[in-house]
Image (tube, rainbow, N blue to C red):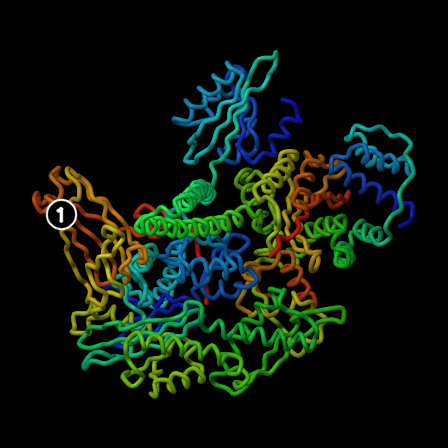
Amino acid sequence: MNRAERSLLSFLDAPVVVGDPDGRAVYVNPAFEERFGQAADEVAGLPLAELFQGGGREAVLRAVAEVCERGESVRFPLRERGAGFQAVVSPITADEARVGAVILLKEEVEGVERLLALQREIADPLSELEATLQSLHEQTGGRRSPQHRADLEDALRALARVRKWCDELGDTLAGRATAAAAGRFDPAQLVRLVAQRLESRSGSSGPAIELLAPASLPLARGDAAKLEAILLRAAQDRVEADPAPAALTLGARCVGRDAARAVLVSLSERARPHAVLAPLREAALVAEVLAASGGALHVASDPALGRTTLLRFPLAEG
Amino acid sequence: MSAHEAEIARLMARGLDLYGLGQVREATECWRRVLALDPGHAEARDFLHTAGGEPEPPAATAAADPVMEEARGLLRGGRLVEGLDLLETVAGNEPARLEVQALVELVRAALLHTYRRNVGNGARVPRVRIPPEQVLKYNLPASAGFLLSLIDGRTSVDELLALSGMDPFEVLRGVSNLLDAGIVEAAA
Amino acid sequence: MSRVIGIDLGTTNSCVAIIENGQPSVIPNAGGYKTTPSMFAVTQDGKRLVGHLAKRQAITNARNTVFASKRVIGRRFDDGEVQKCIELCPYSIVRGQNDDPRIEVGGKAFTCTEIASIILREMKRVAEEYLGEPVQEAVITVPAYFNDAQRQCTKDAGRIAGLEVLRIINEPTAAALAYGFGKKNDEKIAVYDLGGGTFDISILEMGQGVIEVLATAGNTFLGGEDFDRRIVNWLIERFQSSDSIDLRGDPMALQRLKDAAEKAKCDLSQREAVEINLPFIASDTQGPRHLSIELSREQLEGLVHDIVSETLKTVERCMSDAGLGAQDIDQVILVGGQTRMPLVQQAVADYFNKRPHKGVNPDEVVAVGAAIQGEALTSEEENLLLLDVTPLSLGIATFGGHFAKLIERNTTVPVRKGHIFTTTRDHQTAVKIRVLQGESDVAAENDLLGEFVLTGIRRAPKGEPEIEVSFDIDANGIVSVSARDLETGKEQSITVNATGTLDESEIQQIIEEHELYEVQAKG
């Protein structure tokens, strides 16, 4: 796999596993690591079966074999470590034009979204039923017995009530689903989480993590999970790049007034004499991810003090 | 500091900024300019070497921002508190200038340790040592007023950090300044 | 022998009391306060705060400070009350796996039972510190309108906190006990409870140790904090007109204003006017600004008189539900710190045309009643042993969505009622039973306590098997169900786990988790 392919996969929210034609794992993206705790360098070369558990293991292996043989994508539901996914296994051409597989696990939709989909499924035949009854009512206009007419009218009234409730249900569910997908997050909470993860990963051997953020900040706009992954990876890179790690400072604060208000999240590292700190990995891609939600990226350095990587987020409205 | 030295410092830092963003070519360009101004600049050579660039003659240079240059000068001279004051004034007037905000972060991270040392052990309990009417004579920011409202002679610095809900840097800077001004004293 | 404590687990403040040498005594916390804010917070560095410490940072750390979680305990996530809290509270409330509301603070979702247990543990600690010995048993109070799930959650919270909950009693009942009512003749008592965050009015009928709640009404979003908010807004407007600075967007200023408003309000119950001084409240290019404003009792009354009138409308409604007029009430009791305000006392006295009882501190009276009940439950002497009544009818859903009441409301508890079930299809081996609580004839309009499936029924033609299902309501108002096949005598015991309550393994897990945390609390 080349660097560009890895970069692309690394920003996907869904867990992805890339397998070679021999059924061995080549790469897993950060979303996979986040979800299942195994990083790309840990899984490289392992049989794909070792990445999955229980019944899911069999299903994945069967699907990979089928995909490698036929060269066509396979889609199937998968339960893995307590969560439901839609697994999509697609063929990729690996070295010597042999076929490997990409396994993409798309998390099953949230309860509210599933209910919303069901509500829509119900609403459609209701409309058909309504139209049919209405047409029956019109067609049989003068030929109906009083009983027949009363029955039809009762049915139409009952249907109108069901329709009203169904629409109300749809509105309520849609409101909830929108709120859940609104993409808001508290930047103070974000840096706190990243600091906790960093500390639990590097333990006592890692650098001291300073947290400079108030208890809470106004909500910012952006995909919290993606931003957490970016920040965590940037910090992790710093930890790994430095054999004698100095303190890292994670900060979050609010700046500006009125419409110009924004939140800044920062990662600061100390300078090392006569050494230039390694550049931020995938800076262009990170800048793109931020720009997608109206944010920006900046890096400032000082030979004596060190470097700050600064992420700016616009505030969420309301 | 001469204009010549200031320009060298600006180019060194600008190169680091660009390098940090992965813009290696632009970064090496800055350090080459430094070498054009001062061919013996060892750090610029080290940086160029790390970035894999060779010292070559640079292109024309862009104009510098005098206020930022002054701030950078203060930081180079180790006068971090004054440097931060100046940077915060610029950032307050122009919050969208990310290069200023980023530098503010860098200085805050560096100054944190100074303030922590000054305030001392987190178990120390600060208390106001002058009468309220005398406190009014000081020119304190609202954040210091808020801290003063929490300082009751029973609440420790660690508790202030937890209770105030403020950024720990602001708490430590506030308490440190109140101690320096003699408004507050802290018992072990 | 371990002592029994009485705990008033309030929406805004909690209080703990004990009987010492035959006299009730309210236990102060380490800071000398006799009530502790029912607040819990997680600070930015992960420290857990409870009580006054949590309150001191409630505005500057609003998103991670839980207050008034009692409003949502034992309710379903979709309940109107929960949805209202989601709209109004700065902390985040999410749907839990049992369809219960969970409160997210410091990156963790807490069940409401867990939050209540943290407050109860703090009250237990306050008592233990005062008594210098461990405390294991408690009587805890709940509002009279609490249903089975809400009572069950409160009881579970007690267990998680390390307390054996001897009894859950109704708050107005506890207040009446504290005044020693109901020992002799039948009396009708109005309990006007205006706390920090809620208002409740209950009409009780007491006599010979039996207490009946004739009617109860209230507003779970009206209380002393609304008075504080009015003062804060008034101060903000005054400051804006004098100094042209709007303090609304500044959490540090708001925290100071809120604290100052609450203090001023309390002082104005004793004094005619107070001076509110907040130095360095803001600053601008001209330097620091100080807030210094005088507030008189008359001004305060002008700011809040409509809130007091609003409570009287609720009283009127409750009296009409009970079918009584003001002249039918024998005693009026004031409960809740906000009833210290002279305007409130006067309004209640005018309504009932009677001087209300306010001898005992109104924010301590419920805890005192709970302690008295705790003493009565454990003492060998002959004391008033309270017999409460069920606040809501209990029954099952029947064919066609109807509600069949098996135990009517106001039945004295404990109570046990049996009902014979049979099959509706040939060879049916299982029946599903839905247990509900409420007053509506339509099953869907009542609270679902739980549902269970009765299995192992003998294969027989429909209508032949006879299964007796017994419904028990214990003295706490908590429901349990058991079933017996009358033919074989085979017994089946069923736990009714209402939505939102925790199962045994969840309770154990929380107990273990809590042992890991050192909850910081002081004053």
The residue lying at 11 percent from left, 38 percent from top is C460
Say which of B159 and C338 sits in front. C338
Residue nearer the viewer, C201 or B101: C201
Q: In this view, which residue lies farthest toward the front?
A: A142
Residue A110 placement, left or right of B44: left
- Residue B135 in view here: no
* Marked residue chain, label 1: C
Of the 4 image quadrants, the one containing the N terminus of chain A is top right
The location of residue C232, given as percent across then percent down, is 57, 73
Q: x, y percentage for residue C370?
A: 29, 70
Foreground residue among A169 and C197:
A169
Q: Residue furthest top?
A: A96
- Mark 1 surroundings within 10 Å by alpha-carbon count, few (fewer than 14), some (14 through 19), many (20 or more): many
Q: Position of residue C422 (x, y in %)?
A: 14, 46
Q: Name the residue furthest left.
A: C487
**Would residue C210 be found to the left or right of residue C15 on screen?**
left
The C terminus of chain A sits in image quarter: bottom right
Q: Report which quarter residue B13 is drawn in.
A: top right
Q: Is residue C450 above or below residue A4?
A: below
The residue drawn where x is 77% and y is 41% is B17
Q: Mark yes or no: residue C391 visible.
A: yes
Q: Is residue A256 left or right of residue B73?
A: left
Residue at mark 1: C467
Could you tell me how many numbered marks the image carries? 1
Residue C286 in the image: x percent, y percent? 76, 71
Horizontal side, residue A98 vs residue C322: left or right: right
Q: Is residue B172 above or below residue A310?
A: below
As rendered, which of C247 and C15 lies closer to the eye?
C247
Which element type, helix, strand or loop, lies under badge 1?
A: strand
Residue C157 drawn above or below residue C347? above
Amino acid, disc 1: Ile
Q: Residue at x 44, y 34 (%)?
A: A84
